[in-house]
Image: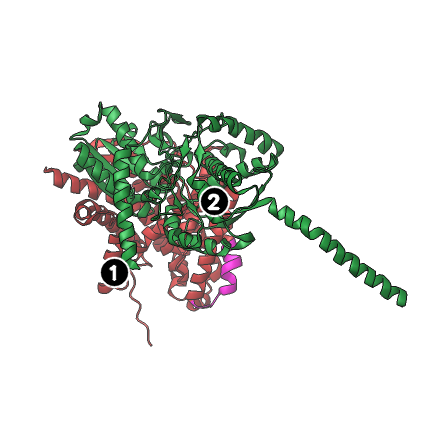
Chain colours: A red, B green
Amino acid sequence: MSETLLFALELTISGLLVGLMYSLVALGFVLIYKASGVFNFAQGDMTFLAALALASFVVKIPLWISLIVVLAIMLILAMAVERIVLKPLVARPPLVLFMATIGVAFFLQGLAQGIWGTQPRGLELGLADQTYDVAGMFISNMDILGAVVAGILLIALVWFFQKTKTGRALRAVSDDHEAALAVGIPLRKAWGITWAIAGIVAIVAGALWGSRVGVQASLALLALKALPVLIIGGIDSIPGAILGGLIIGAAENLAEGLIGPAVGGGIKNFFPYLLALIVLAVRPYGLFGREIIERV
Amino acid sequence: MFEAMRLRCALVISLAMACLLLMPALSAAQDKEQWLPLLCYRTGPYAPGGSGICGGMEDYFDLLNLKGGIDGIKLKWEECETAYSPPRGVECYERTKKEHGGAIVYHPISTGITYALMERATADKIPLTSIGYGRADAQFGGEIFPYTFPLVTTYWSQVTGKINYIASKEGGLDKLKGKKIALLYIDVAYGQETIPILKTLAEKYGFELGLFPVPAPGLEQSAQWLDIKRRFKADWVINRNWGISCTVPLKEAVRVGFSRDRIIGVWWCGSEEDVVPAGPAAKDYITTNFHGVGQEFPIIQEILENIYMKGKGNLPVTRVGTVYYNRGVIHGIITAEALRTAYKKFGAKPINGEQMKWALENLNIDEKRIKELGAEGFMPPLKTSPTDHEGGGWIRFQQWDGAKWKPISDWIAPMRDVVQAEVKRSAEDYAAKKGEKK
């Protein structure tokens, strides 16, 4: 295999593995959008808060107990958001709810740093970084772990939304709040469950990304990586989040590695947005997004 | 009724007289205070750096005040939160520059804010220091950069020191020929600052320079690292990032099997906050620094004893002696020594920006003075002049042993000939462009 081909293949594999981890972050957005039609600006900060809490507990108590404690925190947080922020805004336009999530984002960042401090932390999941040489390519055990965990979670969520009664109820809520209420689906309960699931996704994303790059406030900026994933995959589609993540992960790596040197480099952040713009022009609802036809 | 009126009149007259009597005392108290606005960032992604530096600096000021101030003049300061953002830095500058009789010096603690303030501060005649950051060619001083002071050492001095260090490991400067050095940098003004001087050095010593920009915030750098390892096949990597983008390379290096003792970080990638999150991946990583790390220095012990042991202090005691904390203390020492120099020249009373400029251009913190300050081994000598706003350029190297930073070199001088030539060229270029703009 030529060196350039091997390099391109390695960039692709590494990008796909990272892409699955982008999908995890994007998934939090998808879940809340599906159930409430709200673009949750606070998802990145939820990821940061979960990671910071986990990193703080794991140095004092075993990992599995830390995970349970953080899970409890995220569930309480979900209930608090539902009670304090969403309940007063029922039947308000989506833009109002979006603005409320901006407030939640800043509050969560301040809350997390207020409780656990601003100092960056490491997050060890009990697995040392190791790299395997597979057919001349570097494959990291942490990347494989990230991809496997992300894959399992994604499959579980697809099953939950397709096969369970609660999942179907949540989908009904996302279709039409008023119609769901009319058939007896409790809207507030549905929102609470959705935020709780988004909190669980934030824990998984926070743990994987925290172990990969460390835990500090910049982790909240992962949300910026999730945006093109959502645009490409479709903001209301779980399979879309998976495919969008894979596309973005591979494309940004290939762009940086192969096109970057010719244009001065540093295009990894910009290229996914270029792709997203192209997709927006061709399929405004994304590759898997639901096309909504509205009477105007 | 008449009695009551008389009583009221007496009371008003007494109050007025008391005010008249107290006014000189109040004014005298103000005469004995030097006000300093501090641009800090204790919030946002870069808070660990900002809080450490401001915390260390303010603890040092507190220590001086406990000892009676500088020549009897106590320091009074006020923080303005910039969150490391240039627009907020400019806002803080504009809001504070005329308060309490006027600002006399600013430490922006950010290259971006330094760039944003340079022309304003020059117009307002307020010195702007950038201790270990900022615009390297401003060390030229003179009429081109009269109010900008990249003190102690600049990025250009530092990078020549790094090449010297790499050469020492390779067996001499002549052995650099054919070697490959990758510059992995965050793609903003700060990150790009050393490219011109590295290009000059690459040409002079025959090594190949590879440029690998990282778009901010730099959370994901796998493509750059595969390129560095696979295609460029770097012998050494210079890690010139900031915040989380400093930590990511250490993890990525493990993934591609690149030895950490061949990565040389800038001092803004050389704090505990940069290596602790990387865990074991950071072991053996090398960075530059321009001050000591640890609590063993007398000056740090004095702060611990007089501030922290008495339940005061700006930060948790565990941060005292860390890289950013000690960087704050060196900021404090330089500010205080400049004030001392100014009071000696202009009299022991609050000074203005122009007088502070004179002091910063006539600083001389020699070995003797460093010892008196309890900062032996903590900071290098510093001697400035109107045409040398840097004052030395000394740096040292440190290595992370998995638990703490260990110094691995003595103070190393920069390649002055190379730096000075580039400084002159760049400063004159800046002056020419500024002339065109006018």
Q: Nearer the viewer, residue A202 or A281?
A: A281
* Above or below, comparing residue A128 to residue A283 in the picture: above
Q: Nearer the viewer, residue A31 or B106?
A: B106
Q: Main secondary structure of the magenta part?
A: helix
Q: Residue furthest left?
A: A2
Residue B29 horizontal side relative to residue B284, left or right: right
Q: What x and y, as percent, mark residue A116?
A: 50, 41
Q: Quadrant of the C terminus of chain B?
A: bottom left
Of all chains, the one bearing label 1 is: A
Specify the amino acid type for callout 1.
Leu
Q: Secondary structure at mark 1?
A: helix
Q: Secondary structure at mark 2?
A: helix
Does A83 lie within the magenta span? yes
Quarter of the image for residue B383 reads top left
Residue at the (45%, 58%) spot, across then down: A101
Q: Which residues are magenta?
A: A80-93
Q: What x and y, as percent, mark residue A32?
A: 40, 57
Does B283 lie within the magenta span? no
Q: What x and y, as percent, mark residue A27?
A: 35, 52
Instruction: Tell me the residue that label 1 is attached to.
Output: A277
- Examine the rendering and report whether any part of residue B340 can be seen: yes
Instruction: Tell me the residue that label 2 is attached to.
Output: B356
